[in-house]
Amino acid sequence: MKALLVVEDDKIAEIARFYLRPLGFEAVRYRNPLKALDNLDEIEPNAIVVSARDFPRHWKVIAQVARTMWSKDKCVIVLLKGDLFPFEEAAKAAHIGVNGVVRDDLDDRHEQTRFQHLLKRYVTVDESRSAERLAPSPWDRLDFMFAHPLTFSPVAGRLETVSPAGISFIPDSPALVADLEPGRTIEDCSLRVGDRILSLSCLVVRSDRLLGLEIASMDEGDREYLGEYLAACPEREMQALLKKD
């Protein structure tokens, strides 16, 4: 599946691409909305993600043209709004046929969840890649660390989200990973899941304050165990709350 990103801000585009990947979307990005409009029929996107902050006038044209070509079920249109988005603009988006509006602060866990759920509601995604990234709670035993692929220094930090497909991670010492660029493979990674330590290799897909990693290689039994553990997280949280009460 293809997702058309019409976003000028590099950081927002990178984060959007990161959260589209587990759903099975190949992202095609344009900084120029007119070029995106010209190539709309050629790309035939299954989803369009356009920034209302970057392009306050052009998003309406793109959405209108897209809706003359595809229905809401055939092409999901997600509008990324900034801090100022008047009610009138929201009404126009609904009238045109935009599927949903999400804040462009995709570093926020709530907005990440809304963004992915909105896409999954309208598009049949590849279930083998669509595992939702779970944000660990205090009741989960989930930790991650790896050896830097060049210096072999241990890198520890905080897991932000995890799924059988990928990991987002904030290193304790950002300077240690400043040279890790997208496309770099990290062979020596360890993920604590409950009482087990899983070995895996990861591909860097995002390098910023938050490190985005795609799980490139992992024993299938370990991947299945991770999926089962994550699926049971809400149940563990409920049990912990009941015990606390």
Image (cartoon, rainbow, N blue to C red):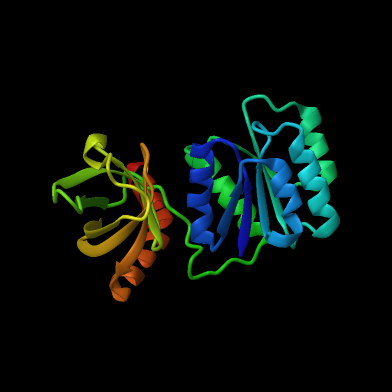
Q: Is residue 20 visible?
A: yes
Q: Position of residue 31 (x, y in %)?
A: 61, 41
Residue drawn at (35%, 71%) of the image: 224
Tell me how many marks there are. 0
Q: Residue 166, located in which quarter of the rendered image?
A: bottom left
Which image quadrant: the C terminus?
Answer: top left
In front: 59, or 189? 59
In the picture provided, is 105 more to the left or to the right than 75?
left
Query: Compared to 139, does 87 lie above or below?
Result: above
Q: Is residue 44 visible?
A: no
Residue drawn at (65%, 31%) of the image: 53
In front: 40, or 63? 40
Query: Compared to 147, does 50 lie above or below?
Result: above
Q: Position of residue 119 (x, y in %)?
A: 63, 55
Q: Position of residue 27 (x, y in %)?
A: 57, 55
In the picture provided, is 41 more to the left or to the right than 103?
right
Q: Residue 210, located in which quarter of the rendered image?
A: top left
Residue drawn at (58%, 46%) of the image: 114
Residue drawn at (27%, 42%) of the image: 179
Which image quadrant: the N terminus?
Answer: bottom right
Q: Residue 165, located in which quarter of the rendered image?
A: bottom left
In front: 231, or 183? 183
In the picture provided, is 52 more to the left or to the right than 153?
right
Q: Position of residue 34 (x, y in %)?
A: 73, 43
Query: Compared to 230, does 88 lie above or below?
Result: above
Q: Residue furthest bottom?
A: 221
